[in-house]
Image (spheres, grey):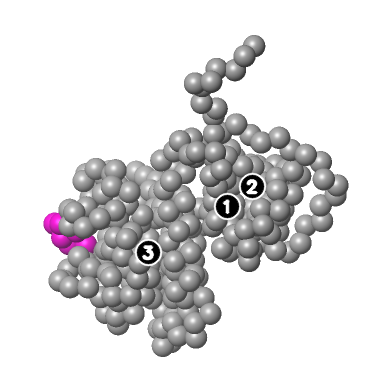
Amino acid sequence: MEPNPGARLSRFERAQKTERGKLWLMERDELLLTELFVHQVMSRGQLQELYFGSVPRCNARLRKLFDHGYVTRDFHPMAPYGTQGIYRIGPQAMTIVAQRLDMDAAYVKQLCLGTRRLEFLEHTLEIVDFYLAARNALVGEANPHLESWMPELQVRHEYEVKLASGKQQKQVFKPDGFLRFDHGGRLYSHFVEIDRGNASGKLFGQKVEHYQHYLSSGLFEEMYEDATFRVLVVTTGERRLTHLRALVQERGGSVFWFTTRGLLTQQGLLATIWQPADREGLFSLQNKDQG
């Protein structure tokens, strides 16, 4: 049957694997697969920035990992042909990742079969972009320097609270990420929220209250051995920033600091681009006042 010239091929249609002989995994491959798993998805460009010096080297290695089932590859459904692939770990990588992270293999498999919704993909890729911005600003620097980074999968915390009725209720605390850096011997702890402008005011207000409870309950100090934190909110533009900041001010959320995606991209994580909820002006994250 003749193909329909007006039809659009699905960008999620899998490429065909080709057998290219045996593949011996290197330590870099296992690190790549583990990091890819904890971030859930990454684009080819993000993987290249983390692990390869050039596009050809990145493409060649990812192709081998794909052919042997260690990674899977999808595409943004509205992207034109020739766009970057979006990668997840494949079936052959699940045992390796489970062993390296000391996780149950069935749980790893379950997470690998996660959603492919467009909103999820775009949001997750923007979290990785934030990680790369932090890495570029802090890795290799004597002072300040990156102490730790954890994406949502690793920072997620399920716990129970006792209600007035005496019943126990499960709560799930799941920031988009956690960043901690050392500056002059002092640790600066930050939870990260990537706001794409589609969360309602009610939903964002609930998020603010959840953070306040997490801080006041002592759970943060228990989990991270630190007394306080900031919440870094990266949002779409000045108008959205002003709206979210007003919502936080109504709830007394002084630990929230805001910036826009444009400022973060143009000036970098450590620039004077952050606007706290409880004061006017722009500040650097190295400001000694943690609140």
Marks 2 and 3, the one that precedes in the sequence? 2
> Depth-wise, is mark 1 or mark 2 nearer the camera?
1
Whether the magenta-drawn stretch holds residue 250 is answered as yes
Name the residue tied to disc 1.
Answer: 44
Q: Which amino acid does label 3 sit on?
A: Thr
Q: Are marks 1 and 2 in contact (CB under 8 Å)?
A: no
Marks 1 and 2, the one that precedes in the sequence? 1
Relative side of 262 to 85, left or right? left
Q: Which amino acid does label 2 sit on?
A: Ile
Q: Where, quadrant-wise, is the N terminus in this rendering? A: top right
Name the residue tied to disc 3.
Answer: 265
Q: Which amino acid does label 1 sit on?
A: Arg
Residue 112: image quadrant is top right
Name the residue tied to disc 2.
Answer: 89
Relative side of 82 to 262, left or right? right
Residue drawn at point x = 47 percent, y = 79 percent: 145
**Could you tell me residue 33's position as x and y percent?**
65, 55
Which sits in the foreground, 53 or 161? 53
Per the model, the C-alpha gap separating discs 1 and 2 is: 13 Å
Q: Are marks 2 and 3 in contact (CB under 8 Å)?
A: no
> Depth-wise, is mark 2 or mark 3 nearer the camera?
3
Residue drawn at point x = 38 percent, y = 48 percent: 171
Marks 1 and 3, the one that precedes in the sequence? 1
Q: Where, quadrant-wise, is the C terminus in this rendering? A: bottom left
Whether the magenta-drawn stretch holds residue 156 is answered as no
Part of the protein shown in magenta:
245-253
